[in-house]
Amino acid sequence: MICFYKKFVAASLGLAFAVGTAIAQVQSEFPIKFNLSNQQAPKGYKQVTTTTAYNNTTGYGYDFDTKPTAVNRKGKAELTTDFVTSDKPFYFSVNVPEGNYRVTLTLGDINGTSLTTVKAESRRLMLEKVATQKEQIKKVSFIVNIRKPQISTGGRVSLKPREIGKLDWDDKLTLEFSDTKPCVDAIEIEKADNQTTIYLAGNSTVVDQDDEPWASWGQMITRFFKPGVAIADHAESGLSLGSFLGSHRLDKILSLIKPGDYLFIEFGHNDQKEKGPEDGAYGSYTQRFKLFINKVRERQGIPVIVTSTARRSFSPEGKTINTLGDYPAAARKVASEEKVALIDLNAMSTQFYDALGVEKSTKAFVYYPAYTFPGQDKPLADDTHFNGYGAYELAKCVLEGIKANHLGIEKYIINAPTFNPSQPDPVETFSLPLSPKSTAIKPDGN
């Protein structure tokens, strides 16, 4: 695992400087179709054998030294006679320009069952446990947003050192395949410029966390939208409204946002630590919220305020304590005054923790004994940052907020029955395959 991590980071850093010819070769061929097989590819498909490693010249292939096994089932329809599989996660990358892409996967084994989970970029959950039976093949599509640090109107996003080499900011679209028996027959990638894009601005509770066991609702909510909506998560750990502005992340979003796109804004954890004379919930926090709202509206976008997730902190009576001061109330006040849709994630996360209780609520956060993950020689106990289960449940809370506000994107939500945070999914039955990369280093912010 540690060896994999070093190669993963080295490869990511190298790709930040990928040669331009690879981009030109790939982008001129949309839609791109890949047949994952050691047999001859059908007409119109690029052949990808198990030895096709990603490189900057071709601009596609298996990435980070992962290599699945090819299986050939003869005597059936040509595209579905072969697939690749592995008992470990494997990666496939394609060098593409910035934008939204529709990815269509052909999944299944005509001679047996399959179970496939797919993540994209920095562990965004795209497909969860897609199952096929014998002689059943499924084609499933989802939208992946690709972004670069450069800003078309000038300048670039000021990335933190922890973001250098992150898959969310490199020159490629990366897919991670895993589960008990992933069976991938083919991959198709095409430009999808007509999507409604939901931009996310926030901190470590929203960002696409690169490494296990850390997770956020921003990288889980992708799983609940069908094509028609793209999620562009521009959040980063440790940021406040002010540092999001200062690092040119709002400038980046404003250079891309189209009329009818959304900006979901969740801040508070790090803003409350700013102690200047103009700071405070009803000072700079309120004024910056209004700046974000006005800038998005100038571009005919739709701002949405999301109150900050509560921290895990309980009273002696076993009820969640508000540790965020006036910040959730200030966000609600701005939403009311500016007539902006409000998703009260602070209230819903409080209900969620109270439902789990003092002890069981640790199962939603990064609480793990020493040596659970490679290189982790001390216990992890974090009352702010979520694991996969906690992030998944909070994503469901955000979906309920979208439904309650009857936002236009509601019609694109899939596989999301009504969710009550006071009656969360049982943690005992929650299961998602872990990604290979892990770290014991806590994300910035608290």
Image (spheres, helix red, strand yellow):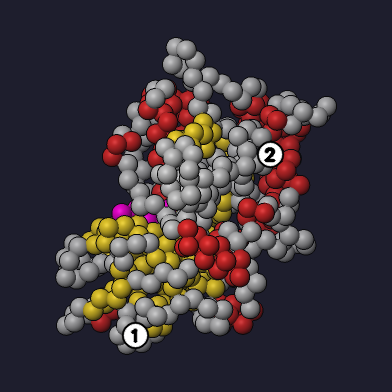
- The residue labelled by disc 1 is 41
Q: Residue at x 77, y 28 (%)?
A: 275
Queried whether the magenta region covers residue 128, the answer comes back as yes
Q: Where does the C terminus fall, quadrant-wise? A: top right
Q: How far across and how far down the image is residue 200, in percent?
A: 58, 47
Q: Quadrant of residue 252?
A: bottom right
Please identify the residue farthest to the front as the structure is shown: 377
Q: What amino acid is labelled 1 in the image? A: Ala
Q: Nearer the viewer, residue 431 or 77?
A: 431
Name which of mark 1 and mark 2 comes first in the sequence: 1
Q: Position of 50 compared to 410: left or right?
A: left
Residue 219 appears anywhere in the view: no
Residue 316 among magenta residues: no
- Element under disc 1: loop
* Numbered circle sitting on residue 240: 2
Residue 7, above or below 391: below
Secondary element at tag 2: loop
Q: Residue at the location (29% across, 76% down)?
A: 70
Range drawn in magenta:
125-129
Question: Residue 189 occupies which quadrant of the picture?
Answer: bottom left
> Which amino acid type corresponds to the residue marked 2 in the rendered image?
Ser
Q: Position of residue 196 (x, y in %)?
A: 53, 55
- The total of numbered circles placed on residues is 2
Residue positioned 65% across, 26% down in the render: 327
In this rendering, would 443 be left or right of 404?
right
> Would you say the magenta stretch is mainly helix, strand or loop?
strand
Please rate how many residues cluster around mark 2, counting C-alpha atoms within 10 Å: few if below 14, some from 14 to 19, many from 20.
many
